[in-house]
Amino acid sequence: MATRRSITFILLMVVVGLNLRPAMSSVAPLLTRLQESAGLSAAAAGLLTTLPVLFLGLSAPLAPVLAKRIGSERALSAALTLLAAGLILRGLPLPGALFIGSAMAGCAIGVGGTLLPALVKRELPNSADLLTGLYTMALCLGGALGAGLSVPLTQLLGSWQASLMSWSLLALFALLLWHFQMPRPTRVSAQLTANPRGSQPTPPQSGILLLLKQPLTWHIMLYMGIQSSMAYIVFGWLPTLLVDRGYNEADAGWTMAISIMCQLVSALGAPWLARMGRDQRPALLLVLLSTAIGLWMLLIAPLIWKWPGAALLGIGQGGSFSLALSLLVLRTANSRLAGQLSGLVQGGGYTLAALGPFGVGVMLQAGANTAHIAWLLIALITVCGGFALLAGRNQRLDDHSGELLVQRATPTV
């Protein structure tokens, strides 16, 4: 039975999740305008789309350290504060403010996005994978709002700077709501987090080193990194690539927004689909195939396939990311391990993912066309499928004996 605490936490999770994608998706529809008005080259535009992802990856491993020092709740408050400040800074008429503010927003998203899976595991451990789907749905909705409203807000507010700054209002709202309603750890949950099942506590540094020695950690990290790279290439470059194919700026932005809106369905449904089998491999391969077909339809096939392509791309990417976050809770036995694995996987994965948007900018600068980029992305999705087969096996990291072991997980059917 749902309690008031659990319902409040779910609502807070959704509001915070809404803030973790507009900082990136709101730039993409304006990228052509930024290149014209701010004089950005394709490589510089690639750097602008890369910075949030790069700093997201670099800051994610800091989240468990901050959580240990000041608590997960206060650490998330600090992340939302930094996010609001970065969103405001990137619209100010100061040298380098656009780039610095984007990097600050990336740091905030890295910390916040790493803390939330561990909090979900702590607050509602028996439904952690399904709630991760709901959280991913909130991320997708935030991304869709950023992509779809970016150009209209520019027209309404009179400048792209005001449009980018306006997203700080959503971050400030989430900060106030979280500050006054954030969950406090109960004595039981604190004891279980510090010393699960009566085991000997493992120092965070040594726990991280042990995780790094496990192949399963690397399988999840590489799957996370490659599928995230696809997502941030779409966030950063899809409207530009569509404009190159003949779309106007607003239509390209709305096509991306509709694709992201389609992520809502698969983000919520993918964890349910994953529970229907003995492991997550079929679900992982299905969503990756959907992503590849969607990219082909949008970037290579005739324009008549635009809407089916946008839908399939959204369904694939929403499911891929939802399952990636679900793996963080399905592959760990307790919230402490989930937090450590989340920091490692998101830190390494997003740092790897940052190469994607920058690489596309370099390719465009070198004269590559949209079809060349599309085929490269489809090849990367194929590689990602190999890591999905490894990460999707029914295994779990457990340290109840004082040692970190990989065990067969309880069936999810």
Image (cartoon, rainbow, N blue to C red):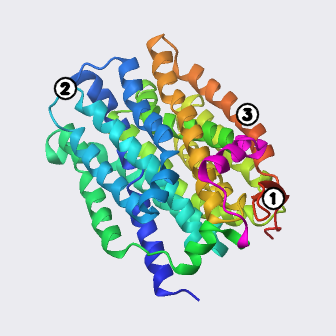
When the figure is inspected, residue 124 is found, relative to residue 275, above or below; the finding is: below
Where's residue 11, x and y in %? Answer: 43, 73
> Is 289 left or right of 105, judged from the image as shown?
right
Circle 2 residue = 95
Which quarter of the image is occupied by the N terminus? bottom right
**Which amino acid, mark 2?**
Pro
**In the rendered picture of this protein, how many numbered marks are placed on residues?**
3
Q: Nearer the viewer, residue 349 or 280?
A: 349
**Which amino acid, mark 3?**
Thr
Please say if the residues under marks 2 and 3 sit with CB atoms less than 8 Å apart: no
Where's residue 362, x and y in %? Answer: 47, 17
**Helix, strand or loop under label 2:** loop
Q: Earlier in the sequence, mark 3 or mark 1?
A: 1
How packed is label 3: few (under 14 Cα within 10 Å), some, or many (20 or more)?
some
Q: Which residues are magenta?
A: 198-219
Where's residue 413, x and y in %? Answer: 81, 70
Circle 3 residue = 382
Circle 1 residue = 279
